[in-house]
Amino acid sequence: MELAKPQVDIGLSTNHLDPMLAFWQQKVGLRFDHALPVRRGQTQYRHDALGSVVKINHHVHPLPATPPSGYRELMISRELQPGPESMIDPDGNRVCIVPKGYQGIDQIGIRLTVRDLASHRRFYTDALGLREEARSQGAAFRAGETLIILEEQTGLPVGDGARGSGWGYITFQVYRVDE
């Protein structure tokens, strides 16, 4: 897979637009880029995170109550950050500002929990062609400048496909996507 941009984007869904925008723009310090109407009742508020886009999808209609997805935490590196600073946004999504280079994160890191590390390892290396990086526990894969960190947790519930609030997806922009 050839990345069209060397960063991975991450998206979340919310019904609480104003407190979420205040948190991500003021507390985390992300720069708002623009709002993108997605469909009737959904607008995506796009924020720059060192080249990655943090997509805050606001839904007018109530989102279903669902278990959290496997996407557990966004880590954003900062020059001169003295140490990790963990925060939780108004919807309960975890974000951590980390010193540049912390655990191999020079741009952003996305931490996921997965039921089967071996199958995810095969997917990220064989299907996506990402390079695995050495890690004492779990696995980590480099997608351009973004580090994707996987931690195995057997017994995680299997979702029904419904997407509620919270972290929901990552996006790779690739060349020749139809191939």
Image (cartoon, grey):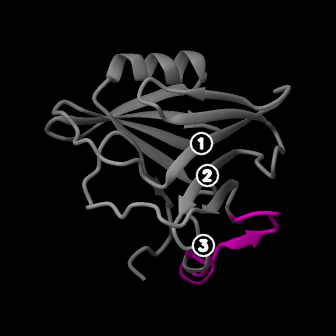
Residue that label 2 marks:
111
**Residue 80: image x %, image y %?**
85, 26
**Residue at (46, 31) in percent of width and height:** 92
For the residues marked 3 and 1, what is the alpha-carbon distance in whole angstroms? 19 Å
Q: Nearer the viewer, residue 117 or 43?
A: 117
Camera-near label (3 vs 1) is: 3
Residue that label 3 marks:
117
For the residues marked 2 and 3, what is the alpha-carbon distance in whole angstroms? 13 Å
**Residue 171: image x %, image y %?**
47, 56
Number of the label disc, if any, that sits on residue 41: none
Residue 66 placement, left or right of 122: left
Magenta span of residues: 120-140
Residue that label 1 marks:
74
Label 3 secondary element: helix
> Cβ–Cβ below 8 Å for labels 1 and 2?
yes
Residue 67 at least partly seen? yes
For the residues marked 1 and 2, what is the alpha-carbon distance in whole angstroms? 7 Å
**Amino acid at the residue labelled 3:** Leu
Circle 2 residues within 10 Å: few <14, some 14–19, many ≥20: many
**Amino acid at the residue labelled 1:** Leu
Quarter assignment of residue 91: top left
**Residue at (84, 45) in percent of width and height:** 101
